[in-house]
Image: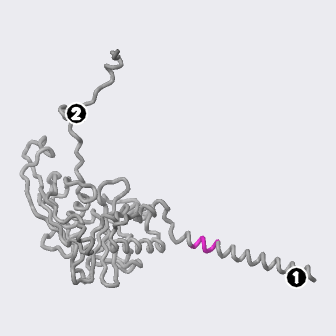
Amino acid sequence: MHTSRRLTGILCLILLCFTFAIFYACKKQKDISTSNSSPHSNQKFFSSSPGTDPTVLSVLNSVKQQDQHRNIVDKLVSKAGYPLWDEAIVATKQDEHRKFIYVPFVLDGKKQTNAILMVKISGSDTAYHLLYGSQYHNYSFDNNVHNPWNANDIYHAFMLFDHQIFHVSEFTVSDPRLTGDTLGSKPRTVTLKDISNSRITSAARENNLFTVTVNTTVVTCHDCGDDDRTYMVWCCNATYSTESVTYYFDDDNDDWGWYPPAGGGGGGEASPCPGCSWEDTNPCALDEHGHAINFCDEEWHPTVLAPTYNPFEASDITVSTGLENVFPCV
């Protein structure tokens, strides 16, 4: 009798342990499935410094929660790149309950801003829009339309981020519409000068108030004449213009194409992907394997100049060891 009770107790204990094991395994599998992003990608994607603005950190944490539900990190890393949270711009005005946050994305190993995550916070509502630089041609080239942004605003905003992040000021621009040239013109050299309010000041950070508008003097080099050898060496027929990028604008009708953080249900007339989530927007047309069908790139790039050899600079002079091997010193 006692043996039977003891056996029954052991069986119940085994069954209880087995039930707990199944429950734990299912829970662990569920936890794993909530984020399929690689640990390295996640760690790099959500990396920020202690001085990052609290508003930017709130966006970071929101994106992290979205990743737990939709596994968006690996998709964003491959298409948009990694976000540079520390370089984000926050635009707001006094007596306004709305903020605009701009987070630059850079592809791994590249030195050019590939996309900008735009976040609009209005009261308790938050909306997202992922803007790729190569999407600029989908927007108006009318310089009288700046609300929200036109093609030239996007073009200058991306160059300003490149200047802020990578300290480059000279760009090669191949779309003549961006430089005021005629169709078929050669690529132009564009230089940014006298940039005002492009960096966040300590006073602005303390008050959580950031620059709304950035003014830049843009120098554009044009044709030097019939001699192609002077092209890209001398700046001929240069034009100077003052360009302004406003990071705060009114968009109550949501024509810009905003997406809720929960995913889906977003878009608008200006959206490249109506009904999608913000991370699904992509300027490229893709085939069934996810490869780009159409050319997808910005029409501007930082100009990379090879250092010129100067024989009068000691740092440029190298001494060959060949003579030493033939005539060793005694």
Pointers 1 and 2 in contact (C-beta within 8 Å): no
Q: Which numbered disc covers residue 136?
A: none
Q: Is residue 26 magenta?
A: yes
x, y (%) of residue 79?
A: 38, 62
Tell me which amino acid carries mark 2: Ala
Circle 1 sits on which residue?
5
The residue depicted at 63 percent of the width and 74 percent of the height is 26
Q: Quadrant of the N terminus?
A: bottom right
Tell me which amino acid carries mark 1: Arg
> Callout 2: few (<14), some (14-19), or many (20+) C-alpha neighbours within 10 Å?
few
Measured along the vertical axis of the image, is residue 297 above or below residue 234? below
Q: Choose mark 1 or mark 2, whichever is in front.
A: 2
x, y (%) of residue 5?
A: 88, 82
Question: Between 291 and 196, which is closer to the camera in this rendering?
Answer: 196
Separation of residues labelled 1 and 2 (CA atoms)? 94 Å
Q: Predominant secondary structure in magenta?
A: helix
x, y (%) of residue 74?
A: 44, 63
Q: Quadrant of the C terminus?
A: top left
Circle 2 sits on which residue?
314
x, y (%) of residue 267?
A: 32, 77
Q: Secondary structure at mark 2?
A: helix
Most extreme residue toward the right is: 1
Q: On the rendered structure, is 131 left or right of 189?
A: right
Quadrant of the image occupied by residue 192:
bottom left
Question: Between 112 and 58, which is closer to the camera in this rendering?
Answer: 58
Colour scheme used in the picture?
one colour
Magenta-drawn segment: 25-30
The residue depicted at 43 percent of the width and 66 percent of the height is 73
